[in-house]
Image (cartoon, rainbow, N blue to C red):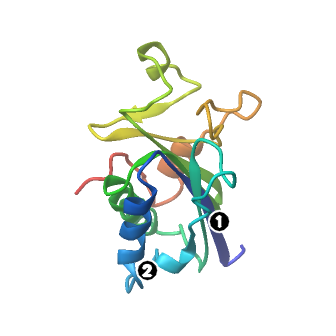
Amino acid sequence: MSEYTSIYGYIKVDREYEKTVNFIKSIGKDAEYPFVNTNMFSFGDYEIPYYYENIFLGFASSHKYFGLDLSDWNKFILKIENILRNIDFESAQFHVESAIGDFTLYWETLTKNFFTDEKENDKLVRLIKTDEWYFGFGRRGAFVGDLDENQIFHDYEDLRNYPNLNFVYPIPK
């Protein structure tokens, strides 16, 4: 079993780039594992023509044995959701390559969502609607949010059924 885990992804910013970057800069260094530090983000370029329509903020980190304990998943997701709650984002996607498998976490804002009520209950799309956003698993297109139909993911069930994890979303407080 590999001890290394890589987590990488993006946050697709809607319009308030400066507010978004300022909030992420305010995070600074995280003292609690799994770490989500300001320096794990790249801020892209906010000048046209270096982006079209949306700016993407990148994220990359590596961890040792991430994901073997449910608290790892819960803490990481809650930290990312705290960021999303305080910025102007359209969608965010984080890929976790871990000892227990590969998982892609996905969030989409409710106010600018790409999904209709019909798709909300689609078993392929598999998004969980909360008061703040949609959350789900599986790699999705950055501009449309559709799940790649050639890759049906069972990440939610895999995390729920992995020994001693019993993942549940939304995360109980």
Q: Nearer the viewer, mark 1 or mark 2?
A: 2
Residue 5 against residue 28 in the figure, above or below: above
Residue 36 against residue 131 in the figure, above or below: below
Q: Would you name the residue on which mark 2 appears?
A: 33
Residue at the outermost right position:
150
Residue at 42 percent across and 52 percent down: it is 167
As drawn, is 147 to the left or to the right of 117?
right
Number of callouts = 2
Residue 105 against residue 82 in the figure, above or below: above
Question: What amino acid type is highlighted by mark number 2?
Answer: Tyr
In which quadrant is the N terminus drawn? bottom right
Residue 59 against residue 50 in the figure, above or below: below
In percent of width and height, residue 96 lies at 62, 60
Residue at the outermost top position:
118
In percent of width and height, residue 15 lies at 45, 47
In percent of width and height, residue 75 lies at 38, 67
SS under mark 1: strand
C-alpha distance separating marks 1 and 2:
15 Å
Q: Nearer the viewer, residue 96 or 165?
A: 96
Residue at 37 percent across and 33 percent down: it is 110
Earlier along the polypeptide chain: callout 1 or callout 2? 2
Q: Which mark is residue 98?
A: 1
In percent of width and height, residue 105 lies at 54, 50
Question: What amino acid type is highlighted by mark number 1?
Answer: Ser
Residue at 51 percent across and 30 percent down: it is 126
In which quadrant is the C terminus drawn? bottom left
Quarter occupied by residue 98: bottom right
Residue at 42 percent across and 32 percent down: it is 112
